Amino acid sequence: MELLIGLGVGLVVGLVVGFALSASRAAAARATAEALRERVRERSGTDAAEERVLRALAPVQETLRTMQHTVGEIERQRHAQHGQLAEQLRHTQATAERSREAAEALASAMSNNAARGVWGETQLRTLVESAGLVHRVDFDTQTTMTAESGPRRPDMVLHLPGGKAMAVDAKVPIAAFLQAQGEGAAERDRLLAEHAKAVRGHVDALAAKQYWTGLETSPEFTVAFIPSEPVLAAALERDPSLLEHAFARRVVLASPVSLWAVLKTVALTWQQEVLSDDARTLFALSRELYGRLATLGEHADRLRRSLASSVEHYNRFVTSLESRVLVTARKLDTLDEARLLPQPELIDTDPKPLVQPEFDWPAGQARA
């Protein structure tokens, strides 16, 4: 009997371990336990043996209930996570749809040459100002010039230190590049090859304009600004000789990163130029101040001599006043004026009047 009970318990434990990961396995374990109890009751024939078996299986039953509860909780969490994942997938799908619509709208807008030109000019001006350059001071936009190829108007003219200038063009063919996005491999390769060909044609057209001949002092090349790094990278990937071709045609292909580095260098050079101008101005003012201080010293020396002469003359004046003039004045004070000056006489004779007719006019009226 003890051996039978031990075998039954081992069987139940094995079943529990085997089916612990799911609710269906737990139910199978309970059914097996019930069947085992029935067999034990049939073979034992006594209530005592059945009671012992039930007591032995009680912990296993409790463990099965706990496992069933845990499995149910895991299942509920799985359903909740699946719901959250489905919501995130729907949100991602909506975002992708909005991005696709925005990309289509951008591609439609960029298919227009005027829109592409405005976009390139805006990107260029933003990049230039972010590098620290000032409009109408360090650069000008849409400046009309006369080159050897005729009247021209580059998108931007950068002013360099020393009176030099450099033309920058911001127009770029981008229609084929935009069409290639989202296409299959074969169609994408064809459109990107067409894009590289269009960029090469743009380089040739820009080289023919010869912007540098319309500037007084300019390096003999034109900067072709490509507003997007992937646009330039795609063209260079499909046409590896494009860069050498542009250099040979005196056109420099510049992406935002490379052009920003050049612009930052120009801004720093302008700062150094301003410092040099200030230093030259300071040196000139110092020389001028030194000369004026020397002149002021000469005036001060003449004033010193004049003051010394004035003091000397004043001292002579005081000496003469006290030793000469006052001595004589005191002698005058001792004289008797009555003996020196006669008694004044009264004048009682009337003044003789004017009797000529020319002098006869009414009183108070002047003769003309």
Image (spheres, rainbow, N blue to C red):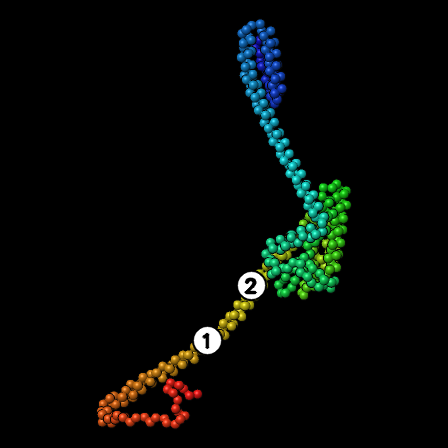
Residue 168 place in picture, x, y as percent? 67, 57
- Drawn side of residue 188 relative to residue 263, left or right: right
The quarter of the displayed image where residue 80 is located? top right
Q: Quadrant of the N terminus?
A: top right
Element type where label 1 sits in the image: helix
Residue occupying the point 58% across, 20% down: 68
Position of the C terminus, as image quadrant, is bottom left
167 left or right, relative to 343 = right
Nearer to us in this view, 328 or 210: 328
In three-dimensional space, the C-alpha distance between marks 2 and 1, rounded to whole angstroms, equals 31 Å
Which residue is disc 1 drawn over?
296
Please state which amino acid type lies under the numbered disc 2. Leu
State the residue position of label 2: 275
Which mark sits nearer the N-terminus, 2 or 1? 2
**Front one among 291 and 340:** 340
Identity of the residue drawn at 58% across and 11% down: 5
Residue 71 position (above or below residue 323)? above
Q: Nearer the viewer, residue 244 or 229?
A: 229
Tell me which residue sits at (54%, 17%) in the image. 62
Dot 1 amino acid type: Leu
Rendered image quadrant of residue 214: bottom right
Q: Which mark is residue 322?
A: none
Name the spot of residue 307 as percent of width and height, x first. 39, 80
Which quadrant of the structure image shows residue 71? top right
Secondary structure beneath dot 2 equals helix
Q: Nearer the viewer, mark 2 or mark 1?
A: 1
- In the rendered image, is residue 258 in sight? no
The relative height of residue 179 versus residue 3 in the rendered view (above or below) is: below
Classify mark 1: residues with Cα within 10 Å, few (<14), some (14-19) or many (20+). Answer: few
From the viewer's perspective, tell me whether residue 164 is left or right of residue 329.
Answer: right
- Residue at 74%, 47% (x, y): give it: 176
